[in-house]
Amino acid sequence: MVLCYGFILRFCKMITFNILSFVVTLALLSCWIPSTEGYQPNRKFDIDFQNDTFTKDGQPFQFASGSFHYFRALPESWRHILRSMRAAGLNTVMTYIEWSLHEPVPGQYRWDGIANLEEFIEIAQSENLYVILRPGPYICAERDMGGFPHWLLTKYSSIKLRTYDTDYLKEVQKWYSQLMPRMARYLYGNGGPVIMVSIENEYGSFHACDRQYMQFLKNLTADNPEAFWKLLRKRLPKGPLVNAEYYPGWLTHWMEPTARVDTGMVVKTLRMMLNQKANVNFYMFFGGTNFGFTAGANDVGPGKYSADITSYDYDAPLDEAGDPTPKYFAIRKALVEVFQGILSRETNIYSLPLSVGLGSKLQLLVESQGRINYNIPNDFKGILGSVTIDSKPLYNWTITCFPLDSYQYMENFLNHQSTDNDDLSDAAAQIYYGTFMLNNDTIYDTYLYPSEWGKGLVFINGFNLGRYWPLAGPQITLYVPRHILTKGSNHIVMIEYQKKVQYPYVQFVDKPIFT
């Protein structure tokens, strides 16, 4: 039998590992938590116009996003694709919401299977991605009628779509009254991953999906963002820079060559925008497929009609099957220059770019993960060769060993640390510790649920439970034997390697969670 316990964590600070680190104190919740939804402090996503940036909980935030439309892939592949996007260095996913999919006939709504938008958002959150929603009602997206239900035209013969037409507004209101209540709990301020909602689509162009206009925008954003920023600043002098549709590829119609976009040009412009602190969304990062009769058309060509092909591969970084392309790896390398990167034997990443101005001192934190147990008997750990910058080896290292197999060492270390209010925002590794109380005479097995954490180790009452790594999965929870828990005060220590945990908390749940 297992039992669910819950508690909230609060901060104090300390220094460890010669690297700045956090320590936390735990506070016990007075009731058991019956679900796996965690405590959420006050959360706010906002705009700081004075400093030209978005803010998340008061701190500057820059999004690197990719478009992935849930309706262009089967639900069974959503997690794999989202995980690949996160692995590329993106922190956000953007998706349209297609009215015609969810209301195929008037008044009958669909939210299951490929239309299970809520599941898509929840998977994105579990993969440590924020979400930007684009609910239209018009989405274009090379979809049949731009995502509008075709029955609008038969129900109202004189309807004027995308205007202040009474019949149109009435149907939009009905649709949004179904959609928006489902989305409310996923907003960032309510504890969800949705940081922004963008209504309509390219309305300034008036003739939506006009290829000449889209080609004009493509040329601005792909080749010369400086011109776009200057135009934007004439209308909006202050605020964050955003390229909501940066095209790494392009759409294709029947009877024309497959559209391709040069990887070098895409990466060069990406670096320029990121260095300008611009927020960027790739349209598309994964294109997918126009299943069934969902492909749309454009009013171009000799007959002013060109139908879109079934594939929406889009020459995107992830191909139609969700597999990475050379463009994916080139983009990932560029993102690493701006956002945090990790050297990894598992992903075959043995080099990282370093930006000028990061400092003159290099620190490496090396994790000793499991040694190979089959076929290779001599699997040595540590830095086994030269560390180089621009092919030049670095010498005169100071090497420190941290014997984490000895909890006594850890306990002594924690007892001798200062709690001065140092600036710990650049900590490479973090230690959190605290206590929680169990008042029952009978104690049961349970599972520790580190939903907001990255990768690291957990000790409870000096016992090493093992590694957690919810960012990678599939294991999310850690088994906690009842025999290591005691009535009264229990001590927990977590060593976090990969993520700056803004709101550190954990839960004890009654069932294991695997993805």
Image (tube, rainbow, N blue to C red):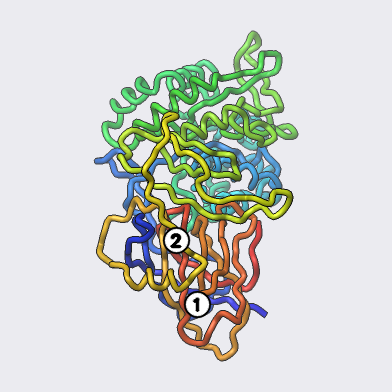
Q: Quadrant of residue 24?
A: bottom left
Q: Residue at x 51, y 87 (%)?
A: 487
Q: Which residue is mark 2?
A: 402
Residue 396 in view in this figure: yes
Per the rendering, the mark at residue 205 is none
* Image quadrant where residue 190 sits: bottom left
Is residue 403 depicted above or below 356 in this figure?
Answer: below
What type is the residue that disc 2 sits on? Answer: Phe
Residue furthest bottom in the image: 441
Task: Indicate which label's residue lies in the foreground, 1 or 2.
Answer: 2
Mark closer to the chain start, 1 or 2: 2
Q: Nearer the viewer, residue 174 or 284?
A: 284
In what element is the residue under mark 1? loop
At horizontal 62% and vertical 76% (from top left) the residue drawn is 481
Q: Position of residue 337 (x, y in %)?
A: 42, 35
- Name the spot of residue 100 as percent of width and height, x first: 64, 39
Picture residue at 36% right of the left edge, 31% below the top: 275
197 left or right, relative to 260 = left
Q: Position of residue 480 (x, y in %)?
A: 59, 73
Q: Residue at x 29, y 44 (%)?
A: 48
Amino acid carrying mark 1 in the image: Asn
